[in-house]
Image: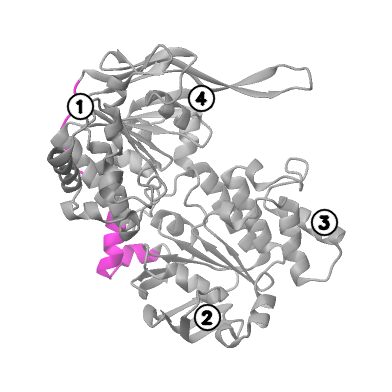
Amino acid sequence: MSLLRIEGLSLAIHDFAILHDVSLTVEPGQIVGVIGESGSGKSMTSLAVMQLLPDGAQATGRILLEGQDVLSLSEAELCRLRGRAMGMVFQEPMTALNPIQTIGDQVAETIRIHEKVSKSVARARARAALARVEMPEDRFPLSRYPHELSGGQRQRVVIAMAIALRPRLLIADEPTTALDVTTQAQILKLLKRLVQEDGMGLLMISHDLAVVADMADHLVIMRHGKVVEAGPSPALFHRLQHPYSKALLAASTHQPERAAQPQEIPLLEVRGVVRDYATAREGLWGKPGTFRAVDDVSFQIRRGESLGLVGESGCGKSTLTRAILGLEEVQAGEILLDGQPVFTGHKPNRAVRRRMQVVFQDPYGSFNPRHRVDRLVTEPFHLLDDPPRGAAREDAIAEALESVGLTPEDRYKYIHEFSGGQRQRIAIARALIIKPDLIILDEAVSALDVSIRAQILDLLADLGDRLGLTYLFISHDLSVVQQVTDRVLVMQSGKIVEQGETAAIFDAPRHAYTKQLLSATPRLPDMTAA
């Protein structure tokens, strides 16, 4: 008997069909990967298994957990199953955790909800669960709060909560999307080990084919609420039949075509930049210490070039970016754009600042949802001494929107009326509207589905050719950096530890840290293998 068997599952919310005749199985000790883009129904399938569906949801078919039909159970019966028989790991650990509860209390709470044990026993078992996810108490006291942990450590706490009662089925919904490649590799290795140790089944939800292909024993590809293809991994990749499956694979390895060649003239010069932060005092009378976030960093970006900056969280990428944009003053060194300093005295140079723009990772979070698109894309006008008004302003908005594949009429809409890819196009339009020379892309495609990511990368390549733009790509996704950049800088602990042509860095890395990053990056199976 299968651990989980979904048979002919269809789901509608307020009579709007979401899932259509979905079937899949998970055996004990098996990892099943469910792949699909946003709106494919993969997350809704996992929520249907847990019966954590929104109001108005109606499901037909069968969801059998060890022969017991989940759809026929009452809420009280489901509450007894959740956590004990099946657990779930969500995408964003900070929202899955209570910010005002310690990690020890949160893991212990999971145990006490399902079993009548004392607080001391629950805390002892919480301590053991955290140790299993490689968070021993001598390094991570139970008294810590979520905000005191890194993203990867918070995800380990969420996993500890999910496996505290050793469930037979674990569902992981995009558990590594926002993590650095090395942290992602550690979390995936941890999940695989837990499956082997406990013999539980793992249902792995992801839009990243490389992650799932490397993890899963069996793959299920979904589109528009339907299973379009399924089979064992990695053999499935060598005999893909459905056009959508082939399109997903092609988008994952898509490389934009760029016609323009970078000039030899440097546009941006960073010379010996140092940025320190004050740390807490040591004792009542002690002096504050210092933390060096950026340590003697020097490099150039040539006009028309695409330069990649890679490194893990905390390496100094974001601090360096803020310094380049004139948002953080540096203690030493200088930053020049076309020979002009980014800072004049202790103030940012507006004449230089207006020639640089940034596109952020989260296109929804970087916009005010109360404003229409026309106001959002004209925000950079505050950098101009004489911003366009009247008809000139309307023409600038229309030109910026059309340049990214949107229509002038989109100016009257609000940001919630667009998809994730369209929002990122609007973010690019906002960056383009004052015609900058340098655009900094801070994880600008890391949250997008592979096909949307390919479209945005094509758009950026086309804009670079047509407008002569220079790009600084900041990313933890090395596969994207490999596809779109001319040169790469590798940053660790505030220092540039390696730099060079992209092909040379990826083919023959010299520094141990670069080799570590590349080895941690998930790879699709070799399609030329027999």
Name the kind of residue labelled 4 in the image.
Gly
Q: Tell which circle, 4 or 3, labels the residue nearer the N-terminal end.
A: 3
From mark 2 to mark 3, how far is it between C-alphas? 34 Å
Task: Please indicate, yes or no, whether residue 528 appears anywhere in the rendered image.
Answer: no
Image mark for residue 334? none
Circle 1 SS class: loop
Judging depth in this view, the residue of 244 and 82 nearest the camera is 82
Q: Tell which circle, 1 or 2, labels the residue nearer the N-terminal end.
A: 2
Task: Please indicate, yes or no, whether residue 264 appears anywhere in the rendered image.
Answer: yes
Query: Which of the image's four quarters has the C terminus?
Result: bottom left
Q: Residues within 10 Å of mark 2 (few under 14, many from 20)?
A: many
Q: Is residue 185 left or right of residue 439?
A: right
Residue at the front extreme?
390
Name the kind of residue labelled 1 in the image.
Pro
Name which quarter of the figure residue 430 lies in: top left
Q: Position of residue 385 (x, y in %)?
A: 24, 25
Q: Residues within 10 Å of mark 4 (few under 14, many from 20)?
A: many
Circle 3 SS class: helix
Image mark for residue 494? 4
From mark 3 to mark 1, how far is it between C-alphas? 60 Å
- Which portion, as a residue range, is magenta? 235-263
Q: Residues within 10 Å of mark 1 (few under 14, many from 20)?
A: some
From mark 4 to mark 2, how far is it between C-alphas? 49 Å
Q: Name the residue carrying label 2.
A: 5
Query: Which of the image's four quarters has the N terminus?
Result: bottom right
Name the kind of residue labelled 2 in the image.
Arg
Please say whether residue 348 is one of the residues in the magenta stretch. Answer: no
Circle 4 SS class: loop
Q: Tell which circle, 3 or 1, labels the residue nearer the N-terminal end.
A: 3
Q: Position of residue 136 (x, y in %)?
A: 74, 46
**392 above or below 27?**
above
Q: Residues within 10 Å of mark 3 (few under 14, many from 20)?
A: few
